Amino acid sequence: MTIGILGKKLGMTQVFQPDGTLVPVTVVQAGPCTVLQVKVKNTSELPEPHRTATTNLGKKRGKLARPRRADGYYAVQLGFDDQRERNVNAAEKGHAAKAGAPAKRFVREIRAAALPAVKQGDVLNVDVLKDVRHVDVIGITKGRGFTGTIKRWNFHRQPMSHGNSKHHRKVGGLGRTYSINKGVPKGKKMCGHYGVEQVTIQNLEVVKIDAERNLLFLRGAIPGHNDGYVIVKQTLKVQV
């Protein structure tokens, strides 16, 4: 199973290594996370109470017991950070109630290659990463609004003199000298909305783990604003 957990970015600070080296770190509150569901590939791998389910067919026809279908893949569905009951619909509340937990704000799946050892209702803490030295962090970047090409794509500005009047940060030519009537080429880097994108930072070193407070200290920066939700997983690439 790919080891992972959900968390929240708290901010950045610095810690000192035993040799006196100062290391910039990002503090992540990793857990506690509730296992809301365990996805399985085959129906025979389902726990005995869940191999059959009841479907409501209406007032006249009553209820019918049918076997639950397999999901076709292995995964663990985790939930992090309790949600206010008034902000939760009935489906979300009922799904979380099967695991004996309140509805969660942040729900994500972590894929696995084999049947996971955890069960529905288990609680995972930052201890699941105690033997992991490097992790991948998935988060949503900060929103930058509508920006120009210099900020969005690192374009150079135009010359500041010799007849260039108030066009220093303009986009310039669009690359269709003889066929501009066909429109802007697909994929052309232009002004537009920047940020709020899913980004993965790979091979971040785990500097320190505080099991009592479920805190994870990672070397360097991770995407997103403070209090933004992130997914922390054991790195998929070998650290060189």
Image (cartoon, rainbow, N blue to C red):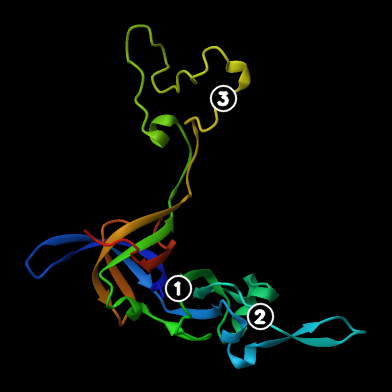
Residue at coordinates 93% horizontally, 84% vertically from top-left?
60
Residue at coordinates 33% horizontally, 64% vertically from top-left?
235
- Disc nearest the viewer among 3 and 1: 1
Sequence-wise first label, 2 or 1: 2
Q: Amino acid at mark 1?
A: Ala
Which residue position holds label 2? 94
Q: Amino acid at mark 3?
A: Val
* Callout 3 touching callout 2 (CB < 8 Å): no
**Residue 57 badge:** none
Residue 223 makes an appearance in the image: no
Q: CA distance from mark 2 to mark 1?
A: 28 Å
Secondary structure beneath disc 1? loop
The x and y percentages for residue 47 are 58, 89
Which residue position holds label 3? 184
Q: Which quarter of the rendered picture does the N terminus lie within? A: bottom left
For the residue pair 175 and 95, the one nearer the viewer reads as 175
Which residue position holds label 1? 113
Sequence-wise first label, 3 or 1: 1
Mark 3 neighbour class, 10 Å CA radius: few under 14, some 14 to 19, many 20 or more: few
Q: Residue furthest top?
A: 163
Sequence-wise first label, 3 or 2: 2
For the residue pair 134 and 117, the one nearer the viewer reads as 117
Mark 2 neighbour class, 10 Å CA radius: few under 14, some 14 to 19, many 20 or more: some
Q: Residue furthest left?
A: 19
Q: Residue furthest bottom?
A: 48
The x and y percentages for residue 219 are 24, 61
Residue 93 placement, left or right of 240: right
The vertical placement of 45 against 84, above or below, is: below
Residue 177 makes an appearance in the image: yes
The x and y percentages for residue 16 are 14, 66
